[in-house]
Image (cartoon, rainbow, N blue to C red):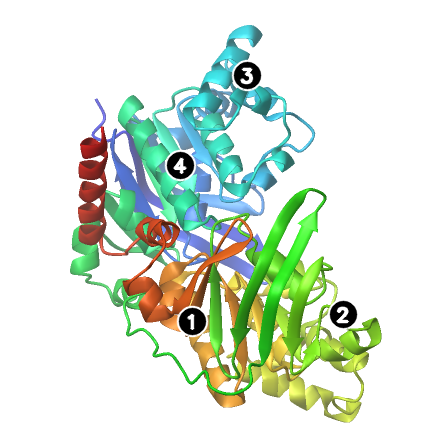
Amino acid sequence: MADHLLEVRNLSVEFHTAQGVVKAVEDVSWHLDRGETLAILGESGSGKSVSASAVMNLIDMPPGRIRQGKILLDGKDLLKMTEEERRRINGKRIAMVFQDPLAHLNPVYTVGWQIAEIMRVHGTAQADARARALALLKRVGLPEPEAALNKYPHQFSGGQRQRLMIAMAVAMKPDILIADEPTTALDVTVQAEVLSLMQELQAETGMGILLITHDLGVVAEIADRVVVMNGGRVVETGEAAEVYTNPQHPYTKKLIGAAPGKGEMPEEGDRDGEPLLKVQSLQKSYGGFHALKGVTFTIMPGETVAVVGESGSGKSTLARALLRLEEPNGGKAIYRGRDLVTMAPKDLFKMRRDIQMVFQDPTQSLNPRMTVYQIISEAWAIHPDILPKSQWRARVSELLTKVGLHPEMAARYPHQFSGGQRQRIAIARALAMEPSLIICDEAVSALDVSIQAQVIQLLDGLRQEFGLSYLFIAHDLPVVRDFADRVIVMKAGRIVEEGPVRQVFDHPREEYTRALLAASLDPDPNIQAARRDARRNMETAVA
């Protein structure tokens, strides 16, 4: 018998590019046992996903090349197997849940067909495969599972699509489930449900879970052991609680130190005087669906107001309605004495200079055919009275420096940057208009913890330097706790609670707010263990 269910020994993976050889993984070793959850923790570019891709035989070769190492499944080296042998293992003994389910679910086939396909490929009869697919949809908690079988991926929410991916992954009852950032973009309550589902399935089947993540809270919630990677190498490994409480490597200490939600909460600023933005009874409907139901709040000059809530609560609709990217059906949004809702298009065009937006995914919001210089200076071409063309290049350099990038990066294209760098470019583009209010729609949700901390620090520094105000839409409550002055809690298109950060976090009035806070993960494994025990005791008492 092999010592471990899965063992990676001295694995090195490199990629041959036009700029030379990139050593993505260098001499990496770790193991996973049956019934265990091993987390590989690290930032983008650390090599954690490449390691998992090597296990699943998903590395394109060329340009990739596995230079050395072994990947042992029950003692047998996967790297020495034929393609046919690997296909028999993938899906049946080793399955994978990806970060973006919409990108990995086929849009032209129903989800029932796709789940059943995995079983048909491995020899299950069609009728049995469909019956098993229905049972899986019930098991992962999809509403109306019979109807869900015949729906397409776009007809489900993000959390539901992740449940579909898990159903597909466990269809053949694999020995190993690889979960690559399975909850990164999910709301806290949905994240808690997905992690709980994975743990339940593990308890039922005894499978080992390999969790790829940059989220310390997720590690604290479900990991038994953790492997910390940096620059393609393993820098630390051990029990999750021990690594958190007694980190040895400087990189591990940096990651833990960057975790949000541990600092002092901001004190509420002065709310006397005239608001910068005063929203009154704002409404937005789509047919018979009411996305915004009489939303009312104010933002003061220099204030950060956070909007939290689950998917479908109306957060992003609120942002789009304020910018008139979606036309409100009623209400007012008084910005510096003028109503954005009824403003004429010509006046709105001018007003938008003063209200900018930073979107969640900079890859989607930055034009891939434009250089960074063109992206930032485009604002001045549209509004030529802001800055003479002779000063554009100097101002672009100044803005890049302001957001922590080098001026020479202006000649590059978006794909040549990391996610955190692209978000900094998006912030520089927003600053080019010299706004007074920036709306951040999940602007840091997909970033690594240390990059997230850097971007939040950057936004806070810009607020102090330029007197900016922020409407900060987020599902990451620890970030909100550290950054915002006030918090708005939304549910089903309404504001259910509002107040200073300290009041909402320490003394929430509404049960919904308490549920959101309870679902938020703490990076300390001991705290999460105590929360789990409390939940189980409560469930036992209710039962």
Q: Nearer the viewer, mark 1 or mark 4?
A: 1
Circle 3 residue: 121
Among the 4 quarters of the image, the one containing residue 431: bottom right
User: What amino acid does circle 1 point to?
Assistant: Arg
Instruction: Determine the CA span between mark 1 and mark 3.
Output: 53 Å
Residue at 59% over, 34% down: 105
Instruction: Determine the CA span between mark 1 and mark 4.
Output: 39 Å
Residue at 73% over, 92% down: 391
Q: Earlier in the sequence, mark 4 or mark 3?
A: 3
Among the 4 quarters of the image, the one containing residue 149: top right
Circle 1 residue: 486
Q: Nearer the viewer, mark 1 or mark 2?
A: 2
Q: Earlier in the sequence, mark 1 or mark 2?
A: 2
**Up-down: is 93 above or below 494?**
above
Q: Is residue 199 visible?
A: yes
Instruction: Determine the CA span between mark 1 and mark 2.
Output: 27 Å
Q: Earlier in the sequence, mark 1 or mark 4?
A: 4
Task: Identify the disc placed on residue 451.
Answer: none
Q: Nearer the viewer, mark 1 or mark 3?
A: 1
**Up-down: is 268 above or below 123?**
below
Q: Is residue 238 visible?
A: no
Circle 2 residue: 342
- Tag 1 secondary structure: strand
Residue at 63% over, 48% down: 290
Q: Depth check: give the residue in front, 20 or 312.
A: 312
Q: Mark 4 Cα within 10 Å, few/some/many (few <14, many 20+)?
A: many
Q: Mark 2 Cα within 10 Å, few/some/many (few <14, many 20+)?
A: some
Instruction: Determine the CA span between mark 4 and mark 3.
Output: 20 Å
Circle 4 residue: 178
User: What amino acid does circle 2 point to?
Assistant: Thr
Residue 348 is situated, as x and y percent measured from the top left of the image, at: 77, 74
